[in-house]
Image (cartoon, rainbow, N blue to C red):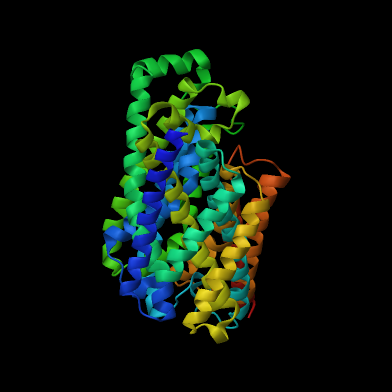
Amino acid sequence: MANQVSIAITFILFLLLFTGVGIYSATCKQNTTTDYLLASRNVNPWLTALSAMATGQSGLLFIGQVGFAYTIGISSFWLTLGWAIGDYLAWWSVFKQLREVSETTNSDTVSSFLSQNIKGSRAIAIISALIIIVFLGSYAAAQLVAGSKALNAVFGWNYNLGIIIGAIIVVIYCFSGGIRASIWTDALQSTIMIGSLLLLLTVAVMNCGGMEELWRSLSTIDPSLIDWTPRNQPLGFLPFLLGWVVAGFGVVGQPHIMVRAMAIDSAKNLDFARNLKTGLGLITSVSAMGVGLTARVLLPNLMTTGDPELALPYLSLELLPVILVGLMLAGLFSATISTADSQILSCSAALTQDLFPNLANSYSWAKLGTLGVTGGILAIALIGDNNVFALVTFSWSSLASGLGPLLVLQVWQRPVTVATAMAMMGVGIAMALIWKLGLNLSGVIYEVFPGMVAGMGVYGLSQVLNHFKLSRF
């Protein structure tokens, strides 16, 4: 009991710190919707990189990715590498232009950017906003679930209590400073994420007897755990890896990350932000994979009688002093909150700016929308599936497939008609859903690949048909 009290005190102190930073950010705010949604496009590159890393990795890192490595072993590295390559390519080829064009066109939201310079674009804004609310809302719900899983593992609390605590914290600092509060707290939280993961990994490897003994133990448990090549891949390794590269590139369809590029103080600083974000992201991803592997040795029963996605909090309880368990729990919880707040703000922007444009300039309406969206996401989290990895990857693929191809075309200023844009969004999402749920092929190639290819295929077909029509006259 005394241990739990000490852990709780440490954990609460960190939560108060996060909340305090979010509230303090309000001292720099302006009561405008552009400031609430994009921090007046004046975020420095250090904060952009740290915030993008924390927002992009989230509960998938501490819960889903640790559990994935626990289950399949060292071959989970290819997910990390493929995702990092795709993400880097997206930042390199798309995000600088996104920052420039979004300011030129005065686009404060992703949906407004997707519909800019297209005649009759209102339909695009509405459909893309609905896609964001549905799928990004589910994504945010997964973050609240991830945080509640950690609290349940450490304190034995009911899942619903952790979900409600996370939602309350998000509302407090989103109401205080909007996207600026989200970015400032993200930067602090990402620092804690990095430190806590490296600490646990070091202690866990030492308890396994070092790297060599860890490798030997994994081989004894199951030789496939130390096999670098993923098993049971019908099309082979390269299509498997390519699927995760495209999944990483799917960041171009994630509104909560794209707004970071739109909010940076200068497009010239995006190169620095990209490199810093990629380097730190690789450190945390590899560390999370290492934690999952050490947990497979030190906590083997999770595979049969527990939940592999809870390997990190259980390992922390097993190995760390109580005050450091509080730090680790804060790192995990902060990872989930840092993503949930950004996603809630993006959903709120879609609701208040894109579905109801007549009220778009109302600062009070923007904040009211945040409260309403949080209530809806809270409901989804309370009644939804508890598998964080599945929830996150499914939402990510739907957003990437539905919004990604169109965003790339808009960034590159390619001509698109309303009909083509609508078809691209619909076909992209439909293909991703059919690939995953109908054909059950996600284990062969992650569904972002066929989804984005299908979306781009629609555009290619429209160009061929248009050329054919013109050639006839």
**In this rendering, is residue 321 above or below 365?**
above
Horizontal relation, residue 428 to residue 15: left or right: right
Horizontal relation, residue 340 to residue 424: left or right: left
Whether residue 241 is visible, yes or no, is no
Name the one closer to the observer, 357 or 364.
364
Q: What x and y, as percent, mark residue 26?
A: 35, 71
**In this rendering, is residue 306 above or below 185?**
above
Which residue sits at x=29%, y=52%? 275
Q: What x and y, as percent, mark residue 301?
A: 56, 22
Q: What x and y, as percent, mark residue 84?
A: 40, 45
Name the one closer to the observer, 379 or 43.
379
Location of the C terminus (image quadrant): bottom right
Which residue sits at x=33%, y=67%? 24
Q: What x and y, as percent, mark residue 352?
A: 55, 77
**In this rendering, is residue 419 above or below 401?**
below
Horizontal relation, residue 112 to residue 181: left or right: right
Farthest-out residue, bottom:
358
Name the one closer to the observer, 469 or 161.
161
